[in-house]
Image (tube, grey):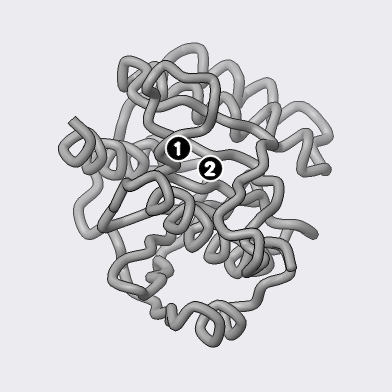
Amino acid sequence: MAYTEFSLSDIAQKFNIGNKIKLLFTSVKPVNISDFLKKSLENASTLPIRSEKAKSEWIVAPILTELRNNNNNFFTIYSGDTLNGDEKSGLKGECDFILAKDIGTFDLNYPIIQIVEAKKNDIEIGIPQCAAQLVGAKFFNEAKGVILPKIYGCVTVGNEWIFMVLENNTIFIDTKIYYLNEIENILGVFQVIIDYYKELLK
């Protein structure tokens, strides 16, 4: 199997990791966007962005770059890299984006956020894939002796964003969908997540 082949039922059966829906972020402080990101998204709105590749280049990557700039390069961004969590269990495959704690190495270390671009412009399609990648990140980190109480994920189709977290052998899926026209709130949610890891990975 690969990450794209998992269902939520597969994850529950193979790894004893269930799933629930709940509101993940009850208090989000909007983050003002820079002129760079504002212009990037304005440019994106004038283009025929239909493919996942186009969305990643014109929408997702600029947002992640903004987040990285806002946090003094606390994390690094991997695009299209393979995450080998546990090959025997099928937890291996290419990931759209992996955010990892930046420790100055070339190799992937400390994956903390998985970002999946859902296919067919259907955000729900990406949820099982993201869930599998969260489990893969858990296995990957633990093999390196890194225990993280929470590993976050996000599924997007460019215009819609939904967040997830793996905690205590349960994948919690946010009941709230964030939209690109509220980009300040999307950045706010990401900032809550990054602040959590700043405290955890000092």
The disc label shown at residue 10, or none: none
* Residue ID at (38%, 70%): 172
x, y percent for residue 117:
66, 49
- CA distance separating discs 1 and 2: 5 Å
Left or right: 60 as drawn, with respect to 195:
right
x, y percent for residue 128:
60, 69
Q: Which residue is mark 2?
A: 180
**For mark 1, does the 10 Å Cα neighbourhood hold few (<14), some (14 to 19), or many (20 or more) residues?**
many
**For mark 2, does the 10 Å Cα neighbourhood hold few (<14), some (14 to 19), or many (20 or more) residues?**
some
Type of amino acid under label 2:
Leu
Residue situated in front as seen by the camera: 190 or 153: 153
Judged from the image, the secondary structure of the residue bearing numbered disc 1 is helix
Residue situated in front as seen by the camera: 40 or 94: 94
Left or right: 163 as drawn, with respect to 44:
left
* Residue ID at (45%, 22%): 66
x, y percent for residue 170:
37, 75
Left or right: 175 as drawn, with respect to 83:
left
